[in-house]
Image (tube, rainbow, N blue to C red):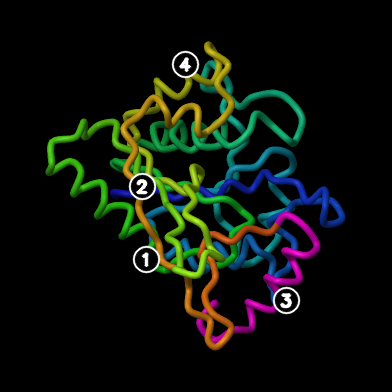
Amino acid sequence: MRTVGVILAGGRARRLGGGDKGLVAVGGTPMLERIVARFGSQVDRLVLSANGDPGRFRSRPPLTGLPVLPDAGADGAPAAGDEDGAGPLAGILAALDWIAAQGLDATHLVSVPTDCPFLPADLVARLAAASAGAQASGAVAPRIVAVARSCPDGSGWIPPRLHPVVARWPVTLRSDLRRALYREGVRSVGAFLARCPVIPVDFAPLDVGPGGGIDPFFNVNTPDDLAAADRLAHAPDAG
């Protein structure tokens, strides 16, 4: 066992009619199910991070059997609170706690959001390769976090952009993350990453034919985004 994946599925679709953002359909398939299909085969174990009733996910065949983890609290027990929770850092911490509780020999956790339906098929391998290269060059191996970055396509349409929640986290960061989150009040993933050696990993646009490329980390936040994602879902190489 080397790598566990966590889908941060706690996002709410407030601008898309409410409910869980991951259950909003793109091209006829809920985004969460698309991500499970694209990402699940890249990791050794897969979990969902979400508060509230886990049955809303477990009742769907592609998600049946996946552990659904509520946010981790300061003492390692599930955090009390509303379904919005304490943000993505608490979901990442919950997955790290789960790895420890299960006694898994995983060395890393890869996190992805629930609203990026076109994740690269080589995401985990590329993040792992970048981490290995950095360790070989003498970086501080136990703390290296490899973070996905959109690579410009040359047209200026896709700007370079770091995606802090699409990252490969060493499990050794668990104690540091709990302290930052619950003792120091750090809520931003970017703020926590500022404390760690970060390796940006560039991903080129996905080629979807004559219309050009798309950012592989395109995320769905608005009705316009959803309409664009529906169109892209029918492109032959978008998946």
Q: Can you say whether 8 is above or below 129 in the image?
A: above
Label annotation for residue 95 = none
Per the image, the residue denoted by label 4 is 179
- First-in-chain label (2 vs 3): 3
Question: Which portion, as a residue range, is magenta?
Answer: 221-239
Front disc: 2 or 3: 2
Mark 2 Cα-neighbour bin, 10 Å: few <14, some 14–19, many ≥20 = many
Rounded to the nearest angstrom, the CA distance separating label 2 from label 1 is 15 Å
Front disc: 4 or 2: 2
Give the quarter of the figure containing the C terminus.
bottom right
Name the residue: 41% across, 66% down.
204
Horizontal relation, residue 5 to residue 36: left or right: left
- Identify the residue at the far top of this view: 183
Name the residue: 35% across, 29% down.
196
Per the image, the residue denoted by label 2 is 200
- First-in-chain label (4 vs 2): 4
Rounded to the nearest angstrom, the CA distance separating label 2 from label 3 is 33 Å
SS class, disc 2: strand
Label annotation for residue 122 = 1
Name the residue: 58% across, 22% down.
73
SS class, disc 1: loop
Q: Amino acid at mark 1?
A: Asp
Front disc: 3 or 1: 1
Horizontal relation, residue 215 to residue 45: left or right: right
- First-in-chain label (3 vs 1): 3
Rounded to the nearest angstrom, the CA distance separating label 4 from label 2 is 24 Å
Per the image, the residue denoted by label 3 is 28
- Give 102 or 196, whichever is nearer the viewer: 196
